[in-house]
Amino acid sequence: MEKYICLHGHFYQPPRENPWTSQVDVQETAHPYHDWNERINAECYESNAKLKNYERMSFNFGPTLLTWLKEKGAYSYEAILQADQISRIRFQGHGSALAQGYNHMIMPLANERDKHTQVIWGIKDFEHRFKRKPEGMWLPETAVDVATLEVLVQHGILFTVLAPAQAAKIRKQGQRVWEEVGQYASVETKRVYKCPLPSGKSIALFFYDGSMATHVAFGGYINSATRFIHGIQREIERPFDEPTVIHCAVDGETYGHHHKRGQLVLKKVFDHFDQSDEAQLINYGSFLERHPPTFEVEIIENTAWSCDSGLNRWSKDDRHSYDTHTRKVHKWRGTLRESLNWLRDQLIDVYETQMCQFCDDPWKARDEYITLLLNLSDNNVDKFIRDIVGAGHALPLQDKTKILKLLEMQKFAMFMFTSCGWFFEDVSRIETIQILRYAARAIELAREITGISFLEDFVSRLEAAQSKDPALVNGRVIFERLIQPSMTHSP
């Protein structure tokens, strides 16, 4: 029986650009480097490129990270693109790169329009860089619901990768009875599954080996190529009467940043199986074509790989907000989510009212805005605006500026939902401050466009977001001290 190995790396860093300058500010905690992107590129992305690891693995890179790499990490950037081309030769025409939702928004918590725009922007960014259509798309934090899977399929995505605890029940195709899996049981990860959807369409789902992923990310595998190889060999030897894919998915930064020699261990693992006949290296697209699903699966909705309580990490206050020193749950996640949802809805009204003066479909215009972001120039700006308003309508400069401000406002209205803002333990973390900076810039643009300010209402809502830092107190204090001084139109 055929046996294959697929090791996936989810390479991602949150967008760190100052929304007023479009440059990443100095981050002292990344010393001796200018910022964390630069440091992680040196420790991980560039070193994996030099070892040619990308050519033999499955991977996705966040679009906003690739934007930074193209400008600041050209060696890594070109190696990533070249690795996908090489993998297409190696894996029967299937490139190893997967697309990703554009700015790492938690998709089940997004509204319907944002779901579509995140997928459309992710696909168009991918096509621009890799010069092909993506077969698979990585969902940020593997956060999933059926509505998100429907959006992926609607836009031509064939498969995605989930954690094993996200499978609810399975059955062999043609059978009527479902077998319960349950969140804390273990779905068989060595096959690909077909997930039927309410629309009548379906998507293929790979559930990675959770035990192996844990050993790689947190256990001994990443510290010893021998242990990593032996762990894979144990799975190869386990009886399974179907074509087998042994695969795991971890943060790509595991290989060199989180674990300083992780990239060298990964290379040794690839070298071993390249020279062995125990199993073949493969990527997801190639396995899917060779061995289409023979089992169906239903998912557990509103789950993610990094939260064992649904999506609470990005929406509610539970143990993720617990401070072991004060023995208190600092309540801020729910307040932050509700405050940003409120702001998003105010900005929707501004956008629709103002953009309808120029075009019939403001949301289609937003979906297309990525094409301009990928090719910024004066000529492309003029062409983009002509395409939006119609070739027969010449607009004065002030109207062109207004259109661009509206689209930038919407871009930042999505960026303020970047998942990292909720991931860690406190509202005063740099990741949360960053998404609040995006919110501030969106508020500022709305005021420039309409003369209406949402600032006071927004910061009033943030007051209920408690910080464990006694000097910063709450979200309002954080915003007024650390963010508002950067705003050109703050009171």
Image: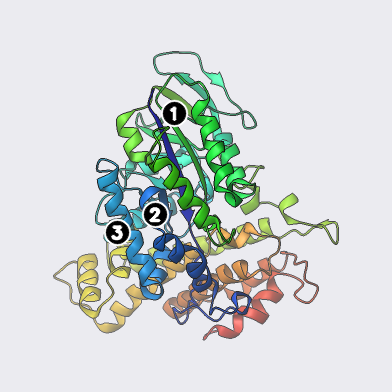
- Per the image, the residue denoted by label 1 is 191
Of residues 194 and 478, the one nearer the viewer is 194
What amino acid is labelled 2 in the image? Tyr
User: Is residue 213 placed above or below 433 in the rendered structure?
Assistant: above
Quadrant containing the C terminus in the rendered view = bottom right
Quadrant containing the N terminus in the rendered view = top left
User: Is residue 392 placed above or below 100 in the rendered structure?
Assistant: below
User: Is residue 391 placed above or below 491 in the rendered structure?
Assistant: above
Report helix, strand or loop for mark 3: helix
Instruction: Mark 3 or mark 2: name the one nearer the start of the chain.
Output: 2
**Distance from the alpha carbon under mark 1 to that under mark 2:** 23 Å
Q: Where residue 299 appears, x then y in whole percent?
A: 51, 32
**Disc 2: CA contacts within 10 A as few (<14), some (14-19) or many (>=20):** many
- Per the image, the residue denoted by label 2 is 54
Which of the two discs, 3 and 1, sits closer to the camera? Answer: 3
What amino acid is labelled 3 in the image? Gln
Q: Where residue 188 appears, x then y in whole percent?
A: 52, 27
Residue at 48% over, 21% down = 240
What amino acid is labelled 1 in the image? Arg
